[in-house]
Image (spheres, rainbow, N blue to C red):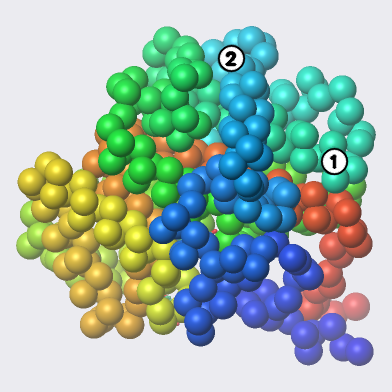
Amino acid sequence: MKTEEKFIPGLDGVIASETAISFLDVDKEKIIINGHDLIELSLKQDYIDILHLLLEGGLPKRAEKTNTEKLLKDHYEVPQSVLEILKLLPKGTHPMDGMRTALSVLAGYDKNIEDRSASTNKDRAYRLLGQLPTITVNSYRIINNQEVMQPAIELSYSANFLYMITGKEPSDLEVEIFDRLLLLYSEHEMPNSTFTARVISSTNSDMYGALTGAISSLKGNLHGGANEAVMYMLNEVETVNEFEHLLYKKLENKEKIMGFGHRVYMKKMDPRALITKEALKKLCEKDNDYTLLEMCEAGEKIMKKEKGLYPNLDYYAAPVYWKLGIPISLYTPIFFSARTAGLAAHIVEQHSNNRIFRPRVKYIGKDY
Ligand SMILES: CC(=O)SCCNC(=O)CCNC(=O)[C@H](O)C(C)(C)COP(=O)(O)OP(=O)(O)OC[C@H]1O[C@@H](n2cnc3c(N)ncnc32)[C@H](O)[C@@H]1OP(=O)(O)O
Ligand SMILES: O=C([O-])CC(=O)C(=O)O
């Protein structure tokens, strides 16, 4: 067997794992999570339902859902030293880097860190998912010289998360839209960050290590960082006309336009983007200001005509975050918080049925 015959740049189309967690059925435009379509689920279920589906393999009954939410709330608090360490980071550190540091610190607090069993890994996942809103928000706040924000236990998980970000009790519409963002971001088969988490887990390394790898992967603007990049791009201009000019200029310069294209969807719209586009419409209606929607729609038309490319989830998610009053540098951290449900499920699965990842290379070095 010659290894070079099998080289596929970017591992495009390569099957890296067997999984019961999720599958992108592009032809049917479905995102299958444990046998359910995430797009259909987004009409009736919320983030806690999906979190339970990912970690337990089925949708929760009413009592199970109540217990799951309570379990998360029981873990809202983080050790004081995590917050103290965040205070030592240089001002201007990106919250993704603050979160990555916080995750590393938490490893030291885990008394059973060497236990990789599914049940201990799941306990760990619930604990981390409970702590993440506190870590996410305070990674931003502390680094920006703001007071530590405490959770509001009486609010739902998603309402509290949004409340901690903006400091204001959110409206029902805002909570509904924010929760849907968490749901849509919760899991997506084998993106780079999930692959990273599985590769790290495959050495028998622990969940904290796998998540710090995954958060580093997600930070890049070809992956999770695209949502922040989309908003910075939209903020470069003020009108639809100016945005059209900006896009044509970028295309002329052969720049990639953030929020477009996808390895798996390729020349199709990401089904999640349709939902975030609807959410943006609702928020524009509420404010009676359609500028961002019109700019994004103009961009969508140009990209389809010029490149045959369609929006991915991040394109419309960015202006939705903006309309919800969320600081731009929290867009990717929120993505990571939501995605931790899916990442944790993959880490549990990898540890439960493991073989170390160790591929080969196509050698193009000096003769020997
Ligand atoms: C939630 C998520 O993580 S979704 C992804 C978020 N990332 C982004 O939005 C960043 C912008 N998009 C991209 O960079 C890419 O489309 C990716 C990274 C998502 C997928 O990358 P790949 O599957 O490797 O596709 P690749 O980068 O090779 O692109 C194929 C062709 O389409 C072009 N293309 C792909 N995306 C874009 C884009 N956003 N803008 C302009 N051209 C693009 C490439 O230039 C390339 O053209 P060429 O064949 O003429 O060289
Ligand atoms: O699937 C991918 O490659 C990226 C993506 O959309 C996600 O992680 O949600």
> Label 2 amino acid?
Leu
Spot occupied by residue 360 in the image (x, y as percentages of width and height): 84, 72
Is residue 229 placed above or below 84 in the rendered structure? below
Residue 7 in view: yes
Q: Residue at x 65, y 68 (%)?
A: 35
* 115 relative position to 313: left or right: right
Image quadrant, ligand 1: bottom left
The 10 Å Cα crowd at callout 1, few under 14, some 14 to 19, many 20 or more, is few
> Label 1 amino acid?
Ser
Residue furthest front in the image: 62
Spot occupied by residue 161 in the image (x, y as percentages of width and height): 45, 30
Q: Quadrant of residue 240?
A: bottom left
Give the mark, 1 or 2, whose residue is nearer the N terminus. Answer: 2
Spot occupied by residue 302 in the image (x, y as percentages of width and height): 21, 74
The 10 Å Cα crowd at callout 2, few under 14, some 14 to 19, many 20 or more, is some
Instruction: Please state which of residues 12 and 158 is positioned toward the viewer in this rendering.
Output: 158
The dot on residue 83 is: 2
Q: Secondary structure at mark 1?
A: helix
Spot occupied by residue 188 in the image (x, y as percentages of width and height): 58, 61
Instruction: Please state which of residues 141 and 343 is positioned toward the viewer in this rendering.
Output: 343
Work out which quarter of the rendered image holds the C terminus and state it: bottom right
Is residue 245 placed above or below 146 in the rendered structure? below
Q: Secondary structure at mark 2?
A: helix
Q: Residue at x 79, y 70 (%)?
A: 18
Of labels 1 and 2, the one closer to you:
1
Give the mark count.
2
Q: Which residue is mark 1?
A: 119
Q: Residue at x 63, y 77 (%)?
A: 12
Residue 212 in view: no
* 225 relative position to 349: left or right: left
Is residue 148 placed above or below 166 in the rendered structure? above
